[in-house]
Amino acid sequence: MCGIVGYVGRRRLVPVVLEGLKRLEYRGYDSAGIVYLQDGALVKFRSEGKLQNLENILGEAIGASSNIGLGHTRWATHGAPTTENAHPHSDCTGDLVVVHNGIIENYHSLRNELLAKGHVFASETDTEVLAHLIEEYLEKDLQVAVTKALARVEGSYALGVLWTGMPDTLIAARNHSPLVLGVHDEEGGFMASDIPPLLPYTDQIIFLDDLELAVLKGDSHVVYSLVSGDKVEKEVKTISWNSAMAEKGGYKHFMLKEIYEQPQAIIDTVSGRINPETGSVELPEMNLSDADLAGIERIFLVACGTSWHAALVAKYWIERWAGIPVEVDIASEFRYRKLLIDKKVLTISISQSGDTADTLAGIRLASELGSKIVTICNVVGSTMTREAHGTVYTHAGPEIGVASTKAFTSQLAALFLFTLYLAEKRGKMEANKRLEMGRELINLAAVIDKMLPSLQEEIKKLIENYYDVRDFLFVGRGLNFPIALEGALKLKEISYIHAEGYASGELKHGPIALIDKDMPVLGLVPRDAVYQKSISNLEEIKARQGRLILIGTQGDEHLKCIADDVIYLP
Ligand code: BG6
């Protein structure tokens, strides 16, 4: 969860990098640093804690005339979050610096080898090994030294390197950790671990692939393969996101802004793909022929975190409406189990970023076993979209809040479209039904848009009764079971309150023992096919003096008889 920003060009370095790092703050970090080249020497600042601490120690250096350098926000993995362990890390001479995201798995043996050769280490990090290893190979050319060093490295890296011996050049390299370049004729060259830092300056993006190295100057960029050493022709992609999309726009924080952007994300994901007159769905970028679709016997959905919850919801839809058996896997489990996959299996990865390492590894394995791969993804040009046979883009725009909100909703919209598409192609759904469901999907954005402001006020009041609890249960049945899991995940990640999601029917098999007045339960009980069953489960909670918040369908007065609080949805 670290951030990298690098720049070489006509602008003053420090503000570009500092602003860029702020745009990556959402990833979480516990120390930060910046380095620039001034009058032939490297000037380095590092601090624990927030970027504000770094800004404070920078003082007048904010106005330094340097226009080449690197910045980093670190999330501690090897070594405590101290100033000494913050990046950038230097070699023994202090003339070379590196910033790094990822983990060097063989750092221990490399460190011992370098210590034996007389290198002196100043931190406990795995990253510092890279600085000394590059120093070991450095003669005249930084690119050659970095290439040789990386050949010795096992693990993952997004890497930025600067050396006084080549004062107009930044080196960027990537393996299993995202890194993008931004290019602009007048502004210069940028590198970053995610797109938002580049948005104020350019919409021209190059996505580095694994085992690639870039030589970045103010007026040029060349990408090489770390395996063959050959030049690689890279496509420069124009992205449609703009800088304002990555700013707070009057909201108190990004997550709230993104909650309010859900209707737009749904509209953008659905528009042009569904015919409002016929309910027919078009997903041409999925790249699957009618024969491919007819041949699918099973679908594997592979994802992590919130995207996995979207997959769990989609299982209910696809099985019910398209009649195809679906298996859903957490990617970090999928990639290490025996996979019974062949060409009759369609594997779908779901990922906001398109760069989550486990999900990526999962689709690579499935592809090797003969499965066609489709990715449902939000980032145009990300690794997954390049490696999959086809893509269904969610057009949610940049999601800055680390806890997924609008990306989740747009994933559901895309998965619903996919379900309608499959159902139609496989002749499983009457045209009338498809039309009705298609229209509901189109209307959804307007319904959410109307509901959000009053809902926010209502929830603000209600939360006064619950904000100080330590534990929470979220329960639901059917489609709302994964939604309960997602609710619990959100509460954990954002409020640091312990929460678990359960299928309502499973409560009686153990968790009900936990119910008392200190364990509120949030139940999802829309008027659906399993409504009565859900109500029976909730009655059991009530009988044990549990506190109940219910989310149900407008007009359902019965909920008030059993709940302490009710939130109604249209
Ligand atoms: C986690 C995020 O780190 O990654 C979740 O906190 C997200 O919100 C998960 O769902 C998976 O990410 P992605 O980009 O593959 O959807």
Image: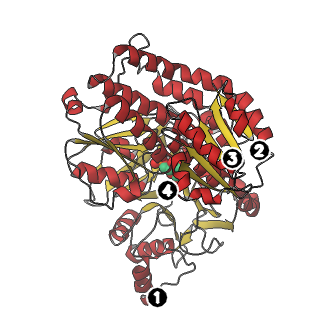
Which disc, if any, is residue 118? Answer: 1
- Between the residue at mark 3 and the residue at mark 4, the CA separation in whole angstroms equals 69 Å
Q: Residues within 10 Å of mark 3 (few under 14, many from 20)?
A: some
Q: Residue at x 56, y 40 (%)?
A: 534
Rendered image quadrant of residue 32: bottom right
In the rendered view, would you say 78 is above or below 262?
A: below
Q: Earlier in the sequence, mark 4 or mark 2?
A: 4
- Between the residue at mark 3 and the residue at mark 2, the CA separation in whole angstroms equals 20 Å
Q: Earlier in the sequence, mark 3 or mark 1?
A: 1
* Secondary structure beneath label 2: helix
As rendered, which of 500 and 214 lies closer to the eye? 500
Residue placed under numbered mark 4 in the picture: 168
Q: Is residue 225 left or right of residue 453?
A: left
In the rendered view, would you say 389 is above or below 274?
A: below
Picture coordinates of residue 340, whole percent (x, y): 23, 53
Q: Residues within 10 Å of mark 4 (few under 14, many from 20)?
A: some
As rendered, which of 318 and 374 lies closer to the eye? 318
In the rendered view, would you say 470 is above or below 425?
A: below
Residue placed under numbered mark 2 in the picture: 463
As rendered, which of 78 and 368 lies closer to the eye? 368
Q: Amino acid at mark 1?
A: Gly
Image quadrant occupied by the C terminus: top right
Q: Residue at x 63, y 70 (%)?
A: 81
Q: Amino acid at mark 2?
A: Ile
Picture coordinates of residue 74, whole percent (x, y): 59, 63
- Between the residue at mark 3 and the residue at mark 1, the CA separation in whole angstroms equals 69 Å
Picture coordinates of residue 505, whole percent (x, y): 52, 47
- Residue 10 visible to an observer of this rendering: no
- Residue 413 visible to an observer of this rendering: yes
Q: Earlier in the sequence, mark 2 or mark 1?
A: 1
Q: Residues within 10 Å of mark 1 (few under 14, many from 20)?
A: few
Q: Amino acid at mark 4?
A: Asp
